[in-house]
Amino acid sequence: MDLLLSRLQRPAAVRGPYYVRLQREIQSLIDAGELGAGSGLPSERELAKALNISRSTVKRSYDRLREAQSLVSSQGRGGTAVGPAPRVSPGMHRLKGFTEEMRELGLTPSARIVERAIAADRTVASIFGRPSQTAFLKLVRVRLADGVPMSREMAWFDLTVAPGMAEWDGEGSAYARLREHCGIELTWADQSVEAILSSPVEDAVFGFERPGPCLLLKRRSHSADDVLVEYVEGTFRGDAYAYRLKLKA
């Protein structure tokens, strides 16, 4: 706690509500590795007393850090710092989902469901070459590795082709679900990658203080008989990803 207190006793570099300053100071300590994975933080009551501020101010800061997955905590505790995002360098030589990719890299994948709906969307229907009223499973998820948010993705699945996806809760691997419940093996995809700056939504997910570099991946995944099954747009944090390609002359 001494390290955090010394930082907060300096003149404020961030204008605005105190809970925002507190949140950003804690986040900067995590990002710099001064609060490593597993480092304990004081309880809300302890930190409020040490800083002579209200407990609700500390709670708001901790809550925002928990929402960004920078802290995990049990009821009534301060929190445990989660270190900077792991650096990963996956290959792009074959089609695979996030779950498989993270396991190959020795990381534990998980997901936080942001939105799940059966919906019709004119723009998405045009991508799939379907009538405008076609039903799709829309799934928005934050994908995590070892508890750290790595990407925010929006995926659409064609329920005309894969009706078994309608009952999927969004947990685990979409590709495993397609294979095991729909009898569909995705065999190839068109994918693009472009550099972007994070949006305010992504800043909150990744715990960025300001817009940061990200990679936007757009993928159209097809079955063995060349039917488009999945369309996904995923924003991957640029401080974590460095994709590898093997090129031949």
Image (spheres, rainbow, N blue to C red):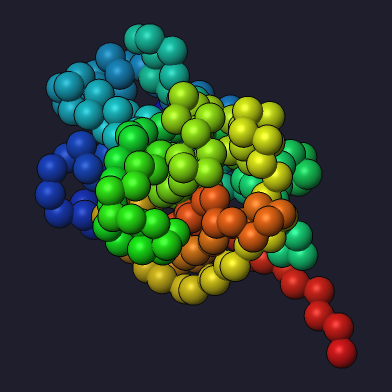
Of all residues, the one furthest to the bottom in this rendering is 249
Q: Is residue 78 left or right of residue 228?
A: left
Of all residues, the one furthest to the right in this rendering is 249
Counting the numbered discs, the total is: 0
Q: Is residue 187 left or right of residue 120?
A: right
Quadrant in the rendering for residue 48: top left
Does residue 89 appear in this view? Answer: no
The residue depicted at 60 percent of the width and 67 percent of the height is: 190
The residue depicted at 18 percent of the width and 28 percent of the height is: 57
- Quadrant in which the N terminus is drawn: top left
The residue depicted at 48 percent of the width and 55 percent of the height is: 231
Does residue 106 appear in this view? Answer: yes
Q: Is residue 190 above or below residue 42?
A: below
| Of residues 247 and 61, the one drawn nearer to the viewer in this rendering | 247
| Of residues 145 and 112, the one drawn nearer to the viewer in this rendering | 112
Of all residues, the one furthest to the top in this rendering is 75
| Of residues 25 and 203, the one drawn nearer to the viewer in this rendering | 203
- Quadrant in which the C terminus is drawn: bottom right
Residue 133, given in percent of the width and then of the height, sits at 28, 48
The residue depicted at 31 percent of the width and 23 percent of the height is: 47
Residue 9, given in percent of the width and then of the height, sits at 27, 42
| Of residues 140 and 178, the one drawn nearer to the viewer in this rendering | 178
Q: Is residue 74 above or below residue 38?
A: above
Q: Is residue 84 left or right of residue 118?
A: right
Residue 59, given in percent of the width and then of the height, sits at 25, 24
